Image (spheres, rainbow, N blue to C red):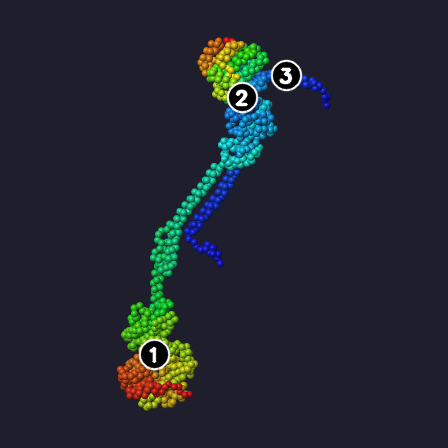
Amino acid sequence: MSPKIAIPTATVNRILALLLLVLPWTMVSFTAQAGHGGVIEARLPSGKMATAEFHAGRRGQPAVLILHGFLQTHTFPTVDSTKDALSTAGYTVVAPTLSLGISRRNRSLPCEALHLHTLDEDVAEVAFWVKWLMRKGHARIVLIGHSFGNLQLLAYMSRTPSPTVKKLLMISLTDVELKQDAQQRAQLANALKARVARNDQTLAEVEFGHCRKYVGPPAALLSYLNLSRQSILADLAGAPAPALAIMGGKDDRMGPDWVATLKARGIDVRVIPGATHFFDNQYEFDLQEAVLEAMAGR
Amino acid sequence: MLNPVLRMARSPRPIAHYALLLFCVLVTALGVLAAFVFHDVARLKEQIAQSDERLARQELSEMIEQLNREAEDAAESLMRWDEARQQLETPTYYAYWRNTRALAAGVLPDTLDAVDLYDSAGRKLPAASEGEAVMPGQIDPQNIRPFLGHEYGHDHLYFFYPFYQDAARTHLIGYAGFKFDLLRHIAQLRKFRYLDLQSVRVGAREGERIPLQEVVPSLQFRTVPNPETRALSGLVARSFYDIGAVIAVISLIGYLSLLSVVTKPLRRLSDHIEAMGRGHGELLGESYRGVLAVAELEKVRQSLNDYQQQLDDMHVSLEDKNQELWTLAHRDPLTGIFNRRAFDDDWNAGRRAQHGTRAEVAFLLFDCDHFKAINDTYGHQAGDQVLQGLAQSLHSALRTGDRLYRLGGDEFATVLFATDIEHARQVAERCVEHVLRHDFSVYGVKEPVRISVGIAHLDDADDEALKLLHRQADLAMYYAKRPGQGKIAVYTPDMGAGQEALVSNAETSAVYEAMADPGRLEMHYQPVLSLQTSRIEYYEALVRIRGEHGLIMPGSIFPVVELRGLESEFDLAVLERVRRDLEAGRIPAGAGVSLNVSGPGIVNARVNDKLMEYAPQLSVYKLVLEVTETSLITQIAQASANLNRLRKEGFTIALDDFGSGYSSLRYLASMPVDLVKFDISMVRSLEESGRQAVFVEDLARMIKDAGYRLVAEGIESEALLQRVTVLGFSHAQGFHIGRPAALPD
């Protein structure tokens, strides 16, 4: 029979308290380590679990955060192929999927689904993943967005961006006033504001962007209506890091003067002739080449 | 005693019945076979039905299993569905999601009736409206086994699954519940082969919950009709109907063929044979001549026709034979007229025809007078010719259609229906005349042939009276034969009294007894007066027989004697009796005795010998032999010889009853006769004025002149005695002179 060893209760309690303090960091760290080279999960400050695809690159190269379009995931082809190209090129890439208020969201969220998410939450998640990269030791970070993701990155950049963000690459930078003009958006925003003002939380079903039926609480929807062409251009103008727009020559999700407007504001725009909004088909490689060139500073 | 049914069963039946029986047997056999087959089919159907039910239940089990899998898949899909996870994390707008998105987003199968999410404690997430598609508000996380609930008349299957946030199923965030409308789901599947979807019912009470594993046993359902079974049943039924129809058609054709080929010819042959049977000897003129289809029947037909042909030939031959036999049987071979058999047949037929009715009828009986004498005298050949002549004469005298019968010997008869007595008498007279006119001399018969006719007549005859008619005619005929009668006599009832002796057993017995014992004879002697001496010269011995009821007179004795041919024997008895009287001296000496000897007795040797025994008496008594002319006709030569010999011995010969018979002077001249006794009828005619008296007077004178002595019979008065005396009669006899009387002992 082995002899019993007596441990003081206070000592045990101190050990447990220490363990509780280090657990969150341990989990995130462990999760990020677990996602090295694959899908990773991370608990957001909101408590929800967010997912991303992460590929570690060569040391010395800037890390890339590439964000999908509106309601999409990181598996969206344009994003996915660009991510692969960057990873192949040796860049550390993280492609998060915005949770949109849903833990472990792994599919695009339909327009008709409940949209409880807000632009602020989206920006917070971008900030989360920038910090996540930073915690991974990356001091140079390039943000790459596609379509509406560019607006969420711009919103991040316009607020409290990390100084580690060195460049902003905007693929198919979208124009929010393409489907609804500023007046329409203003009317909708006013209506939503009125409902919010009277604390009306009933779901709003509106035509929003490319969604014919977009369902969400008035306040959540209203957060996206704060974006406008002017705010975009203003954010671009005030961005703390250089921005480059890579546009498709046949992108129909923007106005015919959108590229010119961007250029007129001094935005560096590279147009790939013939490419659509999604750079599909052979334009996928043109996009990759353009992104890699932009990453290389060429 | 045979059972009537058995008798009926054994009685022959028409062939159509057997054909019908065969048809019934076929139908019965088909019915039995059909019953067996249908029974087997029914058993097979039952087995198939049981198999189908088992398979249907298996389908139900598979359906439930599929539902279970669908529910599991739905649970998997739900857990992978971001929006579902969103509701468990942020259920603020759960009602919207559940009512709008949950079943419409295309993530969950549309067979789901309802879906609900529960938190990790098993509480259903809050939703504004519930409706019938309500799910349980609270589930037991420890017991989330599926079950079937019967609510509001609907049966729903409930499935509950734990809802994990992560794929590793380590982070339970709630529960998902699904609800299927069982019957609607079954109806939507549309893939059941054995289960009748519309028939599925759940045997559960309202609010009752049945665990999933017990759902299938609680289902009530029917199986869909098995197409193979139905096809098989239909095929079998159709086959039997077809076979039945074929058998019916074949049976009908067979029946009609049987009727045409067998029954009809058989019936015709049978009718023909029956007709032959009914023909009573007459064959039908035609037979079934058509060629028959059945060889055996054709052979029968040919055999029948051959048989009929043979019968025809035999019938023709038999007809000829019958006709010949009938002729032989009903015709007299000698005379060609109908014989006694034909008479009997016709008489009976006539009586039958008159049966129950009363008719007028006359029976005429003809008899040849002295035929025996003719036959004996001229021989049988002449006698036969005389009979032929008589038949010919009589037949010619009868009316056309009247039948003449030869009853036997020389006796003929005819029966005249619907004939009164006068007409019958006319017919009889015509017959007598025709006989008289017939020339019998061509047969060598010198004497005239005559007939006597007895007539019996009934004008209102019944059957009993007809029986007596022949007898009455017979009596009348004998009456007609009596001397002095007119040859035709009609029967009268008083005629029967005297003639009854002819056949009276008492008289016959007395005659035979007297012949056996002549002492039984009682001789009465009637005196014969000699007119020349006025003395009784001799006595005629007249025979009587003492009977039980008195004396039997000659009128009753001699018919018996003649009828039975006893003349000679009776003569011997009388002669013996008279001889005894003579020997006894009862006859006065010097007187004489007259003895009557019959015709047969004259030619009889024993009678002659007996007479010769009287020879010693001739010296004492005068012995006279009285013979009738009839007796002389027969065997006249022998009679003459015998009489001559007796005459030479000393007997006096007297011819008796002269004038009552033929009264042939030729016979008289040729006979050895001394005395001629005029018949009483001739003597009595002398008392009358007329031609007959003159004729008798002249005849007496002529005979006397020829040398004969005359004796007058029937002298019953002095005047008559004087008359005959004047006429030269030598002797007289009669009541006036003396009645016959017995001699005193």
In the rendered structure, which amino acid carries the disc numbered 2?
Answer: Gln
On the image, which quarter does residue B742 sit in? bottom left
Q: Quadrant of the C terminus of chain B?
A: bottom left
> Dot 2 surroundings within 10 Å: few (below 14), some, or many (20 or more)?
some
Q: Do marks 1 and 2 share a chain?
A: no
Image position, residue B367 (x, y; %) = 33, 74
Q: Report helix, strand or loop for mark 1.
A: loop
Of the residues shown, which amino acid type is indicated by label 1? Arg
Identify which residue, B398 or B117, lies in the foreground.
B117
Q: In this view, does A293 lie to the left or right of B614?
A: right
- In the structure shown, which secondary structural element does the residue marked by tag 2 occupy? loop
Q: Earlier in the sequence, mark 2 or mark 3?
A: 3
Say if labels 1 and 3 share a chain: no
Distance from disc 2 to disc 3, alpha carbons, whole Å, reads: 39 Å
Mark 3 crowdedness (10 Å alpha carbons): few <14, some 14-19, many ≥20: few
Q: Which residue is drawn at 49% across and 44% down?
A: B36
Work out whether B558 lies above or below B342: below
Badges 1 and 3: C-beta atoms under 8 Å apart?
no
> In this figure, which residue is indicated by the disc labeled 3?
A22
The mark found on residue B482 in the picture is 1
Q: Distance between the residues labelled 1 and 2?
A: 178 Å
**Pointer 2 residue:** A201
Marks 2 and 1: in contact by CB < 8 Å? no
**Label 1 packing within 10 angstroms: few (<14), some (14-19), many (20+):** some
Tag 2–tag 3 contact (CB < 8 Å): no
How many callouts does the rendering have? Answer: 3
Q: Where is residue B138 in the image (x, y as percent from the top left)?
A: 58, 28
